[in-house]
Image: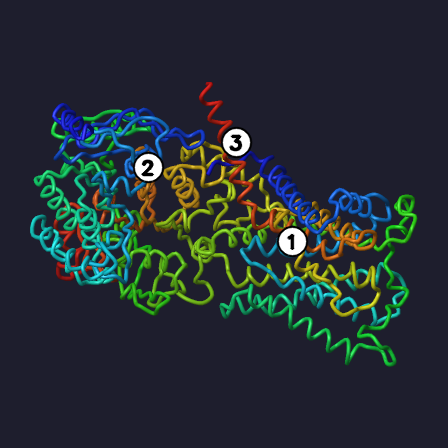
Amino acid sequence: MADMENAGRQETAAPFAIELKGISKAFGPVQANKDINIAVPKGTIHGIIGENGAGKSTLMSILYGFYKADSGTIHINGRPTRIPDSQSAIRAGIGMVFQHFKLVQNFSVLENVVLGAEEGALLNTSLAKARKVLTDLARDYELDVDPDAMIEDLSVGHQQRVEILKALYRQADILILDEPTGVLTPDEADHLFRILKGLKEQGKTIILITHKLREIMEATDNVSVMRRGTMVATVRTAETSPEALAELMVGRKVLLEVEKKPASPGQVVLKVEDLRVRDEHKVERLKGVSFEIRAGEILGIAGVAGNGQSELLEALGGIERATGRISLNGAELPLSGAGADGQSRRAAGIAHVPEDRQRLGLIMDFTAWENIAFGYFGDPAYQRNALFMDNDALREDTRRKMETFDVRPPDPWLPAKSFSGGNQQKIVVAREIERNPDLLLIGQPTRGVDIGAIEFIHKQIVALRDQGKAILLVSVELDEIMSLSDRIAVMFDGHIMGFRDPEKTDERELGMMMAGIAEKGAA
Amino acid sequence: MDRLPRWADVALVPLISLLLAAIISALVLLFIGQSPVEAFEVMVDGALGSPYGWGYTLYYTTSFIFTGLAVTVAFHAGLFNIGGEGQAQLGGLGVALVCLSLPWPHWTLALAAATLGAALFGAAWAAVPAYLQAKRGSHIVITTIMFNYIAAALLVYLLVDVLRPQGQMDPATARFPVGAKLPTLDQIPGFNLIFQRPVPANVTLFIALAMAVVVWAILWRTRLGYQIRAFGKSEAAAKYAGINPTRIILVTMILSGALAGMMSINNVMGEAERLLQNSSEGAGFIGIAVALMGRNHPIGVVLAALLFGFLYQGGAELGLWTSIPIEMRIVVQGLVILFTGALDMMVRMFLARIFGLFRSHKLGAA
């Protein structure tokens, strides 16, 4: 009882839903969070922004009971609260929507919502109760999802709503969303922000973790910026600008716009006709796409992840078998059988920066110098004689490439996994661009890459274009597509929905095409 | 988890694992009413206390280096070759056929030909599961195990019905010609000053050590080794780089099988001088433990092979000189494998925590 009264008094004094005081957390020698102080007023949307590795996820994991802070205290609604595990976090009214959803695919929405919060031994009573709660929530917050639908049949946007419903069903007052828009179309993202605003009006407090400046500006009331484990600033969103936030994140002025001259396309470098790819279950993922890329041109492929872009890159890169026809500088390349592998494609003049650099582009346990030879181990420059590789020459080459591409730290002996995301990507980009290819395939060039490195990688792509090379750019970041591409193709469900001139289109139109709504445009 | 310093990873972890295995072994001995101190003395004295003991220890070590290297090569391609036993027995068949085919004029010629025969037969026996894995997706762990049984059955048939000389009772080949006899360490000038009594360890030891160097060079200094290691780390990435999975699986398993097969020049040609049933005596399986403990590096494999050689010889001595049953050697081996292989992470995590404590103290002081 004394506790309750105490809490009541404090609540009037400090109307914060969450207050973190002096939170520090180290992993071995790495200080992930250093003396973090943050106060989130009740009933607001609070953005937390920062580069990869700035410590956002660690901080939220501490708040949700996954990690124990080395020092510092957590106050929930003014009351000091210990959160040793996620059950305590849920009891304290905190709900978390993870970047990667934690749903059982072959359960219904209702079953997923109840999972772990069942009451009593009989499932049916819980389900009946949940059905009623869900109906109310759907009415109040624009969160309508069919309670009996199977998760595997739902779109990604709807699956995310189920995650939010799960948190609300557990009576969360504070919702934490970790990079919630990464997998959404612009339309779905807008809908999400409407839901969040509705929740705010009902008195819920929301913490939005993102690296997208635009979303911060659009959706939040206040924003905290993290850099290298410290909280560098908390400001009112209305009183700041994307440029100012970017500068706070990186610690120096950053160019957000890509500077590029108008393209001067030359002759056709890549010609793709009716390209089709089936996955291992014989399901067609790429359903007959045709296009051309000219020398000195960047063709950007926009689309929500999983609509055939990966298959397109992998078919062109010689990883996936395909049917149809492709030709490079007029010479047809085989799509299956002999000659349809990564080695042959590189020999033909195609370089490939894969979408998933950690899975495909690098061997994470290999050193930087071993990774520089990846895909190019046949290069005579790396051979000492018929028998042995010339590792000294390889390391020298690596040192040079690391310098040119500003890889930090420039140590060829470090394993790939020890580099940050941005520097890993620079290693891959250095390896591929330095080969002076006729065609560069580049997927998600800046995924998980910090702002400083994004600027650098974008410059490299534009520079390669200006040398008269053809570039196929695949990205789920619409901003990136809009600012880099000379021509945009939108993919949906394995088809190209249409081509657009970035100067003559906008996010709304592209968003509609990404959702498969617009009619198929003429090429 | 915190990373361990390299010296701790390479030396301290196996050392502590061994110590734990020794402690549990001692407890088992106490439990059956025997003295661990006496047992330890007998083992060390019997295996390492005299040149004669070393002669046996090194003989076993030689076999284990081959089978350990075989597992190591396959492991770097992400393949778990459990078929070393069968490949070694087939290697023995290769040795026997070569040795019995000619009245060899000199052992060097016989050794060269027999090495080739052993490698070829071992490689061929490994190539079949490799092909099945690469082309048909049959899991190599399952197929190599099955091939061990097939090898054993095949050898029984051949030894009983085909290769057994008329009038001989036991299922074995005829004795190899004198010209195919390998010099043992006591017959090699220089070494005969140390080894004054006949010992089974023979010139094959030097071939084993040479193969350790060759394996190291292939894995870390050639394009093939680079591709093998890349494929082993990530099959998806290897495909991106244009590495042909079928080729890597086949070539790696052929190398691995050849190494396992070559073990037979040590026991079949160097020691038994005829092919017996179950000639490899489990060395193919010991190779798995040797590779595990040796961290899949040739230097580690040589050291681990020496340890297992000691355990084998020391264990045999136990059976000879004490009332401790010879099966105790299997218990000790089992414990060593358990601690150095399966429970390796336990020691590692414990050490990482201790090192982490030291580190945070240092940081706190700074």
Are the residues flagged by discs 3 and 2 in contact, CB closer than 8 Å?
A: no
Q: Which residue is drawn at 68% across and 65% down?
A: B122
Label 3: how many residues lie within 10 Å, few (<14), some (14-19) or many (20+)?
some
Residue B355: give its label. 3
Q: Position of residue B118 (x, y in %)?
A: 73, 64
Label 2 with label 1: CB-CB less than 8 Å:
no
Q: Distance between the residues labelled 3 and 1?
A: 29 Å
Q: Are marks 3 and 1 in contact (CB under 8 Å)?
A: no
CA distance for labels 3 and 2: 25 Å
Residues A47 and B48: in front is B48
Res B98 quadrant in image: bottom right
Query: Closer to the observer: label 3 or label 1?
Result: 1
| Disc 2, SS | loop
Q: In the image, is B344 to the left or to the right of B260?
A: left
Q: On the image, numbered disc 1 is attached to which residue?
A: B334
Q: Which colour scheme is used?
A: rainbow
Residue B28 in the image: x percent, y percent? 67, 49
Amino acid under disc 1 = Gly
Chain-order first, disc 3 or disc 1: 1
Provide the secondary structure element on which disc 1 rests. helix
Q: Where is residue B75? Give x, y as percent.
A: 58, 54
The image's mark for residue A84 is 2
Q: Is disc 3 in the same subunit as disc 1?
A: yes
What residue type is disc 2 on?
Pro
Q: Is residue B252 among what the camera can see?
A: yes
Q: Which chain contains the residue that carries disc 2?
A: A
Q: Is residue A504 visible?
A: no
Callout 3, which amino acid? Answer: Phe
Considering every residue shown, the one lying at the far top of the view is B366
Q: Position of residue B346 (x, y in %)?
A: 53, 43
